Amino acid sequence: MNSEFIIAVHSLVLLAHKPDGMASSEEIAANVCTHPARVRKVLGFLRKSGYVTTREGSGGGYRLCIDPSDMTLADIYRTMAAGAIKPNWCSGNPDMDCMVGSNMQEVMNDVFCGAERQLENYFQGITIGQMLSRIKACQKT
């Protein structure tokens, strides 16, 4: 899982929590505990995907443009991290003269693709609104 996905989810939940639904990249970065440039990069992807909009100038920042109960973690995962589970390298070589070595890459690719489908299915059942509710429930304990 890449950190951009985590930053995206955190940022969207924070925006959903804000009464006016707006925050600057500096405010979001302080809450996420990262650099504002990283937040701007991530929110740029979210803006292009239609999840947030921006307002320039004094009092400007980022604002949600989709209801948090309509945004699933699967949507965000597909935008920010699709394919992140698949390893960058896999053992074996399709040209090897060995049944195991020549087929390992294909079999592992199938395994990781299946894992990613299951992860997306799990994420499909969790919305940004539900994430905010979970955080509020943690606050009460």
Image (tube, helix red, strand yellow):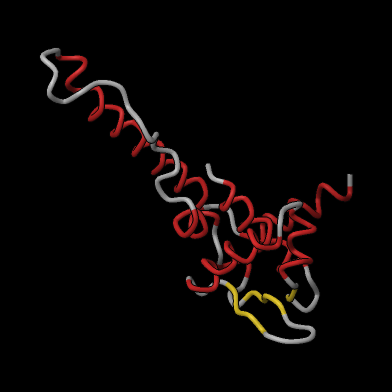
Tell me if 82 is positioned left or right of 103 in this view.
right
Tell me if 122 is positioned left or right of 60 in this view.
left
Residue 80 image point, x, y percent:
49, 56
Q: Residue at x 68, y 56 (%)?
A: 10
Q: Residue at x 66, y 57 (%)?
A: 130
For the image, the number of numbered tags is 0
Q: Residue furthest toward the bottom?
A: 57
Classify 101 as above or below 50.
above
Residue 98 image point, x, y percent:
14, 12
Q: Residue at x 71, y 77 (%)?
A: 61
Q: In the figure, residue 2 lies in which quadrant? A: top right
Residue 21 image point, x, y percent:
73, 75
Quadrant (top left/top right/bottom left/bottom right) for the C terminus: top right
Residue 88 image point, x, y percent:
38, 35
Tell me if 108 is positioned left or right of 35 in this view.
left
Q: Residue at x 40, y 36 (%)?
A: 115
Q: In the figure, residue 84 lies in which quadrant? A: top left
- Comparing 16 with 60, the one in front is 60
Classify 101 as above or below 106.
above
Q: Residue furthest toward the right?
A: 141
Classify 101 as above or below 40.
above
Classify 60 as above or below 79.
below
- Comparing 140 with 94, the one in front is 94
Tell me if 63 is positioned left or right of 107 in this view.
right
